Image: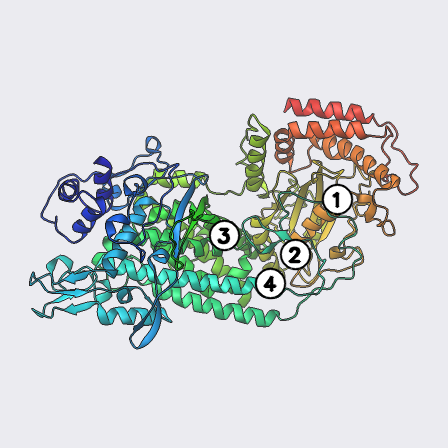
Amino acid sequence: MDKEIAQLVEMGASAAQARAALQQYKDVMEAAEAFFEGKFDNVRDDATPSAESSSQGKRPRMAVCTPDDEDEDEVMEDDEDDVEDFGYDSDDDQMVVDSAKTDVDPYAGIFYSKDRKEEVIEVEEDPETAVVDGETVDLMMQGEWMKGCPEGSEQSFLFQIYSALTTGACPCPSGCAASVPRNRSDFFSLHESFSAYTNHIRKIVRKTCPQCSKQFCFACGESVNSEKIQRPSAAQDDPLFHCSSLQGVILGVGLSMIEHTFLDQTRSEAEKPRSTKRRKTTPTTRDEDSDEPSLLPPRTRTPLKGGIGYAGDGREDNSGQLEALAAQLAKDKKIGSLLTGVRNYLPDLRREGGGHASDYLPHPTALAHLRRRFNSVCSTLLKNDSLADMSERSVLYYELLEWLGTISSHESLASMMAMPIMAVVSVKPVPVKKGTKTNPHYRERTISYEGSPSPRELLEGIAHQASAALKSLEGLRPHDDKPKELTEEEKRMTIDTKGKEKATSVALSEENQALSSFCHRILSTTGAIDSSLRQNKGDAFVERLHASLPKIFTSATHEYVDAGDTEEDAKKAYTNWAKNARFEYCDLTVPNSWNPEDEPNGSPAFKHYYSQEARNLANMDIPKRSLAIAKELAILTATLPTDWNSSIFLKVDETRVDVIKCLITGPDGTPYSNGCYLFDIFLVQRYNDAPPVVKYMTTGGGKYRFNPNLYADGKVCLSLLGTWQGPGWVSGKSTLLQVLISIQSMILCDEPYLNEPGWANEAGTANSKAYTKNVRRMAVKVAMLDALKNPPEPFGDIVRTHFRLKSRSIKQQLDKWLEEDDGKTVSADGGGYGGTERISGVTSFKADIDEMKKLMDAL
């Protein structure tokens, strides 16, 4: 009984109303329906307890009426076991939750892990049609209405409102005994457009009693003149906002239209025929969270053979890009317009003219619809790793930000911003038992869901991109002749409440201005969301949320990371650490290398190979270059590969974002495995029309040539850089990320001997094997031992943490290398270019390995 009372309390009943309803109706759903019909409105209770219970380990089952059902009592055949309360991992001992807010928001103060898994049996039904307003339209079936809902109580809400609005009759509230029958086509007809749907609802929602001529709402059954539903704060009398039930249904159907329109667009893009032209500019693999190609390396990496991307005959396919962009913008405009129309029915206390009663007390299904349907669209859009692409598609993304801002400002919806999105991971048909009668129009599927990042967490990644882009747009402007201290007003973010950028001290080009305004809007929305969450949920809620968000490290934020007790613990710790540490702003200048009083237009020197080139550009304002760098940095903050097998770390000067240092950890399965390889990078004056310049720094003081494409003097041979033949840099298209991944996967490869022109056919030969073993010796001596003894600036913390977390794995690797070694000493040039020059005074390979192990033990 306590559980049933808790369910009714979550639906909005008081404890006394719940007890009274259950005394009269044994079935909880019948009691709920009676409560929603107002039969227990006269029952009062001073205290309304909230309910929380865990549902971990259960498998909810959807309640769906089928043509074979004889009565509704059989529909919820196992509701006693399967329909449960909100099942989230609660941490009440760590948080103080305002009980008044809990009454409004059943999710208040509740967090649950992204490790959460749900399994639910969903129903797929063939759609039915009906003639509505003279047109034949599809009807939304109950399985579609409840699709994607893994939570028992949310299923109850959805089932209750669907059943109420599609079956039976709506009685006249005056008590004259007259009623108007309801049909599925009344509220669940799927019209060609959302405006056509709302126009249809507007025509039918106010009914006139055929007996007493009283007007009443066809959704909730209450009189339109009842004092109970007056909206004194609303400026207009729109019948579509009469009650929360009606607003919840319109929002649910609208979100379904958005979801299907968005998915149809996504499928049409995915189904486009691939170009048959060869592209070997850079390797592409598939991202773990997407079906689309990505530049990120796969988790199980198969190293590419040398030579690819250097001397190939591939050409970049640039055909049809303008047409594709125009088509994309047209589709975005369509979805953006639909989002705008549906957003009007989102519970919003800030709407023009004041909020409606249904805005203050939204129907519980509103949150269920938002969590299921809106989140699927939201997560896809926010996983976009290109800030430039988002800016170009601003008509869609600005509307998305409006949705997020509205949701976070509403007390009943705000918790959704911190909830991990339940994403589909598998779909399996439910097997039919032999001899069981089946309905060909009705199919059951078992859907497995897993938690994925929350909307606020996804937005944080976009905010990092926006900050990086603004740092570039504003950080590469020329020095004033007379540097001055900024006032507090000048330091303040130059945006208004709507996110529109105010005038800045230096004029930006139109394209730069558009990107800058978009970035400011993202940061403004992020700040507004946190402010709303703090107001609605409290400081403890927001602090807990922020602790789980992705971070960009600074020199003051490095924390000790525990490797755990097992290899699996170490892998998880390493991946999480690397994702946070992969991109960092820091000071790369040489102390006291510049006096602004003596040289006001000058620049400090940098701890960087290209320091002089950077100083030469200190006073140049090149808008096109600034925009290219802004886009580049935005991409890098979100997409640098971080994996147990190999990661890329960047350090960017905090005042000169064109000055970059890079550390790549050698990929597993290669002779470079787990070594630390340093590169100095400078984004030149003509960037991105011209490629960056890159210098390899892990050369043992200019002595060791690690690869046919990595010279002892630091030269990096790569077609993208214009230092090797083959597909080169494409202005406006190629990126620094492509360069870094090409170095990681095609230079630091499993058989580097093959990178030398003319040797590509000698895979597996004795010469190739000998070359690989010599590279291993160099890697241990220079990229491991020397790197750990004297970590290259500013990667000291990165190097030490890398070797500490991977210590167990690296020791096993070193033992294997020593066992396979041929006993020779290190050859400076790799053993393939004359092959006789040896480094004098070197210690043995075993001695280097033993010393490396001791250093890792000391960590």
Residue that label 4 marks:
623
Residue furthest to the front in view is 435
Residue that label 3 marks:
462
Residue furthest to the bottom in view is 134
Tell how many labels. Answer: 4
Mark nearest the camera among 3 and 1 is 1
Residue that label 2 marks:
735
Mark nearest the camera among 4 and 1 is 1
Q: Secondary structure at mark 4?
A: helix
Crowding at mark 2 (Cα within 10 Å: few <14, some 14-19, many 20+): many
Q: Quadrant of residue 733?
A: bottom right
Q: Amino acid at mark 1?
A: Cys
Residue that label 1 marks:
749
Q: What is the CA distance from the residue labelled 2 to the residue labelled 4?
A: 18 Å
Image quadrant holding the N terminus, namely top left
Of 12 and 742, which appears nearest the observer?
Answer: 12
Q: Position of residue 180 (x, y in %)?
A: 16, 66
Q: Secondary structure at mark 2?
A: loop
Q: Earlier in the sequence, mark 3 or mark 1?
A: 3
